Amino acid sequence: MAERPTHPTYDMGQHPDIAALRARYDLAAQSRSGQSVSGLAFLSGLYLAISPWVVGFFGRTTLTVNNLVTGIALALLAAGISSAYGRIHGLAWVVPIIGVWTIIAPWVLPPHGASVGMIISNVVTGAVITACGLACVTLGTMSTHRG
Protein backbone atom coordinates (compact mmCIF):
# COMPACT_ATOMS: atom_id res chain seq x y z
CA MET A 1 0.00 0.00 0.00
CA ALA A 2 1.44 3.33 -1.03
CA GLU A 3 1.53 6.19 1.39
CA ARG A 4 -0.44 9.25 0.54
CA PRO A 5 1.71 12.28 0.00
CA THR A 6 1.37 14.78 2.77
CA HIS A 7 1.01 18.42 1.97
CA PRO A 8 1.74 21.08 4.48
CA THR A 9 -1.40 22.62 5.84
CA TYR A 10 -1.76 26.35 5.67
CA ASP A 11 -3.38 28.21 8.52
CA MET A 12 -5.43 31.00 6.98
CA GLY A 13 -5.24 32.90 10.27
CA GLN A 14 -1.53 33.38 9.67
CA HIS A 15 -2.01 35.06 6.30
CA PRO A 16 -0.34 38.50 6.34
CA ASP A 17 -3.49 40.31 5.21
CA ILE A 18 -5.62 38.74 7.92
CA ALA A 19 -2.97 39.42 10.56
CA ALA A 20 -2.79 43.07 9.43
CA LEU A 21 -6.58 43.38 9.51
CA ARG A 22 -6.74 41.94 13.04
CA ALA A 23 -3.99 44.32 14.16
CA ARG A 24 -5.92 47.24 12.68
CA TYR A 25 -9.13 46.15 14.43
CA ASP A 26 -7.29 45.73 17.73
CA LEU A 27 -5.77 49.20 17.35
CA ALA A 28 -9.25 50.65 16.75
CA ALA A 29 -10.61 48.87 19.83
CA GLN A 30 -7.74 50.18 21.95
CA SER A 31 -8.43 53.77 20.95
CA ARG A 32 -10.16 56.07 23.41
CA SER A 33 -13.44 55.94 21.49
CA GLY A 34 -13.25 52.16 21.13
CA GLN A 35 -12.70 51.68 24.85
CA SER A 36 -15.46 54.17 25.67
CA VAL A 37 -17.99 52.42 23.44
CA SER A 38 -17.20 48.93 24.66
CA GLY A 39 -17.06 50.14 28.28
CA LEU A 40 -20.46 51.79 27.99
CA ALA A 41 -21.86 48.64 26.37
CA PHE A 42 -20.41 46.58 29.24
CA LEU A 43 -21.93 48.87 31.87
CA SER A 44 -25.26 48.85 30.00
CA GLY A 45 -25.21 45.06 30.09
CA LEU A 46 -24.55 45.05 33.82
CA TYR A 47 -27.35 47.56 34.40
CA LEU A 48 -29.71 45.52 32.23
CA ALA A 49 -28.90 42.43 34.30
CA ILE A 50 -29.66 44.16 37.62
CA SER A 51 -32.44 46.46 36.38
CA PRO A 52 -35.30 44.27 37.68
CA TRP A 53 -34.03 44.81 41.21
CA VAL A 54 -33.13 48.48 40.70
CA VAL A 55 -36.47 49.43 39.16
CA GLY A 56 -38.45 46.94 41.24
CA PHE A 57 -40.10 44.65 38.72
CA PHE A 58 -38.39 41.42 39.79
CA GLY A 59 -41.83 39.88 40.45
CA ARG A 60 -42.44 39.68 36.68
CA THR A 61 -40.54 36.48 36.05
CA THR A 62 -40.24 36.48 32.25
CA LEU A 63 -38.95 40.05 31.94
CA THR A 64 -36.71 39.58 34.97
CA VAL A 65 -35.09 36.45 33.55
CA ASN A 66 -34.89 38.04 30.10
CA ASN A 67 -33.09 41.14 31.40
CA LEU A 68 -30.77 39.09 33.61
CA VAL A 69 -29.72 36.67 30.87
CA THR A 70 -29.56 39.29 28.12
CA GLY A 71 -27.61 41.68 30.34
CA ILE A 72 -25.03 39.06 31.29
CA ALA A 73 -24.66 38.00 27.65
CA LEU A 74 -24.18 41.63 26.60
CA ALA A 75 -21.62 42.28 29.34
CA LEU A 76 -19.62 39.21 28.27
CA LEU A 77 -19.84 40.19 24.61
CA ALA A 78 -18.74 43.76 25.37
CA ALA A 79 -15.82 42.47 27.44
CA GLY A 80 -14.80 40.29 24.50
CA ILE A 81 -15.10 43.20 22.09
CA SER A 82 -12.93 45.42 24.27
CA SER A 83 -10.25 42.80 24.82
CA ALA A 84 -10.09 40.98 21.47
CA TYR A 85 -11.90 43.06 18.84
CA GLY A 86 -9.65 41.72 16.10
CA ARG A 87 -10.96 38.21 16.71
CA ILE A 88 -14.52 38.97 17.77
CA HIS A 89 -15.51 41.89 15.51
CA GLY A 90 -17.77 39.57 13.51
CA LEU A 91 -20.09 39.32 16.53
CA ALA A 92 -20.43 43.08 17.07
CA TRP A 93 -23.67 43.09 15.03
CA VAL A 94 -25.34 41.18 17.90
CA VAL A 95 -25.11 44.21 20.23
CA PRO A 96 -27.61 46.44 18.37
CA ILE A 97 -29.98 43.47 18.06
CA ILE A 98 -29.83 43.04 21.84
CA GLY A 99 -30.61 46.75 22.14
CA VAL A 100 -33.68 46.52 19.92
CA TRP A 101 -34.83 43.39 21.75
CA THR A 102 -34.45 45.21 25.08
CA ILE A 103 -36.70 48.00 23.81
CA ILE A 104 -39.52 45.71 22.61
CA ALA A 105 -39.29 43.04 25.34
CA PRO A 106 -41.80 44.62 27.78
CA TRP A 107 -44.49 44.43 25.09
CA VAL A 108 -43.55 41.03 23.68
CA LEU A 109 -42.93 38.93 26.78
CA PRO A 110 -45.89 37.80 28.88
CA PRO A 111 -47.47 39.14 31.03
CA HIS A 112 -48.15 42.15 28.84
CA GLY A 113 -49.02 44.59 31.64
CA ALA A 114 -45.64 46.29 31.95
CA SER A 115 -45.43 49.22 34.33
CA VAL A 116 -44.19 52.66 33.29
CA GLY A 117 -40.92 52.11 35.19
CA MET A 118 -40.26 48.84 33.41
CA ILE A 119 -40.94 50.36 30.01
CA ILE A 120 -38.82 53.47 30.62
CA SER A 121 -35.94 51.41 31.99
CA ASN A 122 -35.93 48.99 29.07
CA VAL A 123 -36.44 51.65 26.38
CA VAL A 124 -33.66 53.92 27.65
CA THR A 125 -31.28 51.02 28.27
CA GLY A 126 -32.13 49.51 24.89
CA ALA A 127 -31.50 52.82 23.12
CA VAL A 128 -28.08 53.14 24.77
CA ILE A 129 -27.24 49.53 23.89
CA THR A 130 -28.36 50.03 20.27
CA ALA A 131 -26.23 53.18 19.93
CA CYS A 132 -23.23 51.41 21.46
CA GLY A 133 -23.80 48.43 19.19
CA LEU A 134 -23.92 50.56 16.06
CA ALA A 135 -20.74 52.30 17.20
CA CYS A 136 -19.07 48.91 17.81
CA VAL A 137 -20.04 47.73 14.34
CA THR A 138 -18.76 50.89 12.65
CA LEU A 139 -15.62 50.98 14.80
CA GLY A 140 -13.92 48.30 12.73
CA THR A 141 -15.19 49.50 9.37
CA MET A 142 -14.23 53.10 9.96
CA SER A 143 -10.72 52.12 11.02
CA THR A 144 -10.21 49.98 7.92
CA HIS A 145 -11.35 52.69 5.50
CA ARG A 146 -9.15 55.42 6.92
CA GLY A 147 -6.10 53.78 5.45
Image (cartoon, helix red, strand yellow):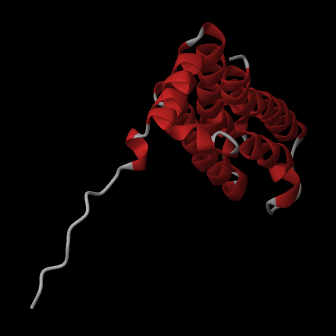
- Outermost residue, left direction? 1
Seen from the viewer's position, the closer of residues 94 and 20 is 20
Residue at the image position 58 percent from the left and 49 percent from the top:
69
* Residue 46 lies in quadrant: top right
Task: Tell me which residue sits at (67%, 25%) in the image.
Answer: 144
From the viewer's perspective, is 20 left or right of 125? left
In the rendered view, does 49 fall on the left or right side of 142? left
- Location of residue 36 (image quadrant): top right
* Front position in the image: 34 or 107: 34
Left or right placement of residue 112 versus residue 128 in this view: right
Residue drawn at (61%, 35%) of the image: 50
Q: With respect to residue 38, does 13 lie above or below?
A: below
Where is residue 47? Give x, y as percent: 64, 29
- How far across and down, in percent of the image, does residue 137 sit? 71, 33
Q: Is 5 situated left or right of 108 in this image?
A: left
Looking at the image, can residue 79 be seen? no
Seen at 87% across and 43% down, the residue is: 115
Residue 48, position in %: x, y?
66, 36
* 90 in relation to 136, above or below: below
For the question of whether residue 81 can be seen, the reply is yes
* Circle count: 0
Q: Nearer the viewer, residue 44 or 22?
A: 22
* Quarter of the image where the N terminus is located: bottom left
Q: Quadrant of the C terminus?
A: top right
- Quick one: 145 or 123, which is closer to the camera? 145
Residue sitting farthest toward the bottom: 1
